[in-house]
Image: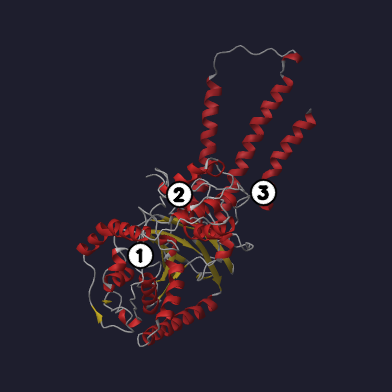
Amino acid sequence: MKRLLYGLMGLLVAVPLTAAEMPLNMTQGVTEISGKVYDLHMIILYICCAIGVVVFGIMIYSMIYHRKSKGAVPADFHDSTKVEIAWTVLPFIILIGMAIPATKTLIAMEDPSDADLTIKVTGSQWKWHYSYFNEDVEFFSLLSTPAEQIQGSAEKTETYLLEVDKPLVLPINRKVRFLMTSDDVIHSWWVPAFAVKKDANPGFINEAWTKIDKVGTYRGQCAELCGKDHGFMPIVVEAVSEADYEQWLLDQKQLAVDAKAAAEASLSQTLTYDELMAQGEQVYMGVCAACHQPNGAGLPGVFPSLIGSPLIKGPVSDHVDIVVNGKPGTAMQAFAKQLTAAEIAAVVTYERNAWGNNSGDVVQAADINGGGSTAETSPASDSATPVTLPATAEQVEQVEQAATEAVTEVVEEAKAEVVLDDLAMEDLMTMGEQVYMSNCAACHQAAGTGLPGAFPSLIGSPAITGPVEGHIEVVVNGKAGTAMQAFGSLLTPQQLAAVITYERNAWGNDSGDAVQASDVDGHGK
């Protein structure tokens, strides 16, 4: 029994001694502060293990050598002042012993003074914006993981969802001060290797700092639930030598000069309608589809639909203005610094002509006049004369008030051409997959797995295995109190029937149910 006791005590002592080699232990990091945090973590672990050895050792010893079968007789006493003093004083001393190194580390973590470099970090849905003070270098950093990996049609890499198009570049051996803020909701900039995790709050500035010791690539993520694409907001930091950093700064400044020259040159270019639509679709899918959805339908109550909206039907100048300057008090960001004039012109052209809008309007880069001025164009024109015509608060209010009426009008027009023909299962599945990928995959994922805790899985779910009528009901009329919107006014009966058939037979569900447009038409009326 003694050997067992000694073995248990040895095991408890061995755990902290081998903790540095354990893959689930805290990351040691590559900065002095992260080293202090790791050392503090290990000190607390040693103290906890020592307390565990003493407490459990006494308990096990008492149970073995003071058990009834050995004739032990329990003491008969009410209380002991000495024991009570001991178990009050000893924990107090232990806590003080923990607090001293912890306080020193926390004070060091909150001291960004005497920094060699200051960078403003701005979070927005769902990207990071980095601005280097006194260097005239700034850029946005967006997720660059291929869509095929996100949709599950390609093999995921080791850095899945931890890749960006433009990483933050920092020099080693220099103290870098971060100023954290946000354009919209609360974000949190977190890089474990630096022991830096600081909230970015709208309207406030938080400070943090780091001093990297080793050249390398370090990854992190937004650590604050900031919306539906929270998981697609990675952080990548490239730590380089001081000489390489200076060269990178020179390269960035030259790129900025070249980009400015290219933007000015684009003002004299006139693109065809097809060229604008092709470029506009690329821009839209890259920066707009996350909110307004790939099919332009938006998310009712959160992000407005662009299909037949008053903004699309109204003056081009208002449309350009809201893309360039955003809309205060909403999630609509200003894209003046994120996109070039050519890209803004292309995406405005695309939005005004995609998804059946077919306005015929063509906007050129020359129509985007200096980040605030907008232009009026005529249908199918190759160019337009720039004018200054910002949207007024009254115009914006009118847009919002007329939104429901416009969508209803478009739906009523579409109903006049409703097709209720029966389709074969193969045709239903083909159409259903297209509808699902455009309207449902953003929430329920391309593989139907959903997002646990947010959007339910459709694989073998009660909605799939239950009556078809219940499935039709939730797709057509939505589900109150959840993010499930009503698609009865967004899709035709044929599309509704197809997507329901697809969901009931895809991903191994294999219900065999084939829903036709006639089964859906008029449902809920």
Tell me the element at label 2.
helix
Give whichever of discs 1 and 2 has the lower sequence position. 1
Quickly name the residue at label 1.
Answer: 333
Q: Which mark is residue 520?
A: 2
User: What separation in Å lies between label 2 and label 3 (alpha carbons)?
Assistant: 60 Å
Q: Is residue 486 left or right of residue 391?
A: right
Residue 498 picture location, percent across and down = 51, 55
Q: Looking at this view, is 420 or 106 the one in front?
A: 420
Rendered-image quadrant of the C terminus:
top left
Residue 48 picture location, percent across and down = 60, 39
Q: Name the mark nearer the viewer: 1 or 2.
A: 2
Quickly name the residue at label 3.
Answer: 19
Residue 456 picture location, percent across and down = 52, 46
Q: Going 27% across and 73% down the picture, which residue do you hit?
A: 317
Give the quadrant of residue 300: bottom left
Q: Going 36% across and 77% down the picture, which residue do you hit?
A: 345
User: What separation in Å lies between label 1 and label 3 (alpha carbons)?
Assistant: 46 Å
Mark 1 residue type: Gln
Rendered-image quadrant of the N terminus:
top right
